[in-house]
Image (tube, rainbow, N blue to C red):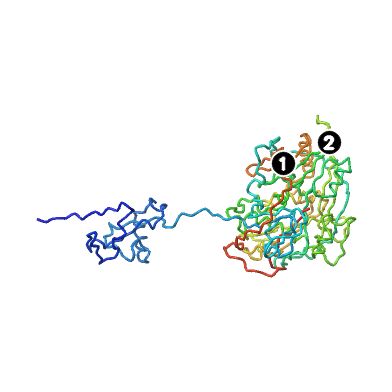
Amino acid sequence: MFSFEMPRVYDNPESWGPKQELPGAAGACNDELGIEERMVDFNLEHLEKYPMTRIGRVCDFTAAGQRYAEQRAAKGKGKGKGVVPIAPKDDEGFALVDSRPPPGKSGGKGRGFGGGKSKGKGKAQVNYQDGFLGQRAKFFANDQQKGKGKGKGKGFKGGKGVPSFKDWSVHTKTEWHMVQEIMLFSLAKLQVNSKDVQVEDLLWCGTLHNYNKEFDRVTVKMERPLRRFEDLNFFNVSTSDDPIMQEYVQEDPTVTVVATDHVLACLIAAARSQYSWDIVVSKIGGKLIFDKRDGSHIDFLTVNETASDQPNNDEPNHINAPTKLGQEASCINQNFSQIVLDPKADAEVMERKNPFDDDEDEDDGTRAASGAYRYRKFTLPGNPKEDNEFNKNPVNLVVRTEVNCRLPGAADSYVSVKALNEFDPKQGTAWRTHLESQRGAVLATELKNNAFKLGRWTAQAMLAGCDTIKVGYVSRVLPSDPWTHTILGVQTHFTDGFAAQIGMTRNNVWGIIRSIIDVVMAFEDGKYLLLKDPTKPVMRIYEVPWETFGEEEVEESEPEDEGPELDAEGNAPVPQPEGVGGPQALKPMGGK
């Protein structure tokens, strides 16, 4: 009679699978365990080599899974160590559906550098995308950050000071009291007859060059490289730090409100915005000061803010992240505003020099960028039907506006120079293939993708009294290189015609400004924050303590070295010489 002997079952209470002493090669024998040679001709796998996340994963028992296991075994990547199972197909083992480890969260801090009040002499930042508009340029010595302090721009460390456009520009606190909420779609209904608005020029500062008409003939086939102006200082000083504004507030009793064109342009185009931004309003003794914070979102331009496919913010340090694109666009506009000037024609020197330039900059080999500040006083009429006495009376508003240049041959024809930038040419919309043949379609796409930015530019041109807007089309030489750009063309638009094209009227512009002034003037004296909600078309007004957003001493520390910034393909950029085509530190626009 045939006898069948049951094999022994070896228990391993310490871990998964057989004991470690069990041989894993055919032909071996373990006398201690009593295992015969024929019993070890199979794959031995100790599960300790796998992470716990793999144990219990969904497995594939289908034919596709079996074929996958055979392919891996043929390549020496199977479960066994060179041992191929000899069992029939019906008894083959299973294979994991996905043997890759689970993806981890993408991390990494934004590239940043420590800053302070210093203006030390040393090596300038090589990446012009880093830095702040509205501040002095940050210079660093090779071994430490020191300097003899001048300027009040706050630095940042580890990317903490870089605004992230898709987040709240300011995180509200529980002690802040919300006094009013304004639905942005209601701003389109506000109207003030622009014919009743009286305008008076108070003061001109700076220098004014002629526009170089050679740039009107630039085409895609005759493109021109965008030069870097590393020896120029750009300014966007806040209202409260402007010495001329302080004179008007303190010495002119008729002035009720002071502001800059950058701040008012955000309010005028607020209904077109998607990202968050904020404005600080101070009411003192019946007078209003519309101001901004140093390094706030208002200091930067946005790129494709209103597009259906907004820039991805998953990797803040990527060259196409919203913050990096905003810094790149802002620097392009600075350089473009200077390259289109005619160097052969004499510049007109205004009655006062640039109020933010000083002799220390000239000693360092830098000077103020060409351009004029035009201080204007607007008298906005009141509404006799209002019950509030203030709303019935006219309001005198002093605004500091900017004029980039003037048209040659016309004394009073002023120009506002701006630049759109292309960072990722796409098939069907690439400027190099469509700008010449389909200019209208390219402009329409930009109006859709950058409605807020173009609305701001139009409002600034209206406030400055510029009859013409020159819009340049600037593209990267290579999509993966955010440091080298070329000018593909320049379009000319009349300000009123362009405003009508984007749906902006002067009556609505003055209606928005007058209504916001009336709303804040009804509050008690104090400091207020106008905060745009990034998730919905709402602007909220918070009452904040006086010391909020005040100057804070920034601890001077060495910058964190997180390695070179990577391009779109994950490669480190090749070092380039400074000058045309080389890296450039983002030029400041103030810091007083």
Closer-to-camera residue (134/277): 134
- Residue at the right extreme? 351
Above or below residue 548? Residue 421 is: below
Query: For the residue labelled by badge 2, is the local secondary structure a helix, a strand or a loop?
Result: loop
Residue type at numbered disc 1: Leu
Query: For the residue labelled by badge 1, is the local secondary structure a helix, a strand or a loop?
Result: strand
- Judge depth for marks 1 and 2 and give the one in front: 1
Q: In which quarter of the image is residue 430?
A: bottom right
- Residue 401 x %, y %: 81, 51
- Residue 466 x %, y %: 82, 53
Closer-to-camera residue (139/531): 139
Q: Quadrant of residue 377?
A: top right
- Residue 340 x %, y %: 78, 63
Residue at numbered disc 1: 529
* Real-space Cα separation, disc 1 to disc 2, in angstroms: 25 Å
Closer-to-camera residue (309/315): 315
Above or below residue 273? Residue 139 is: below
Residue at numbered disc 2: 382
Residue 68: mark in rendering: none
Q: Which residue is drawn at 74% across and 38% down?
A: 189
Residue type at numbered disc 2: Gly
User: In the picture, which quadrant includes the N terminus?
Assistant: bottom left
Q: Quadrant of residue 352?
A: bottom right
Name the side, left or right, on which 451 lies relative to 44.
Answer: right
User: Dot 2: within a 10 Å radius of its alpha carbon, few (fewer than 14), some, or many (20 or more) residues?
Assistant: some
- Residue at the left extreme? 1
- Residue 505 x %, y %: 77, 45
Label 1 vs 2, first from the N-terminus: 2
Would residue 472 be visible to someone looking at this image? no
Closer-to-camera residue (564/302): 564
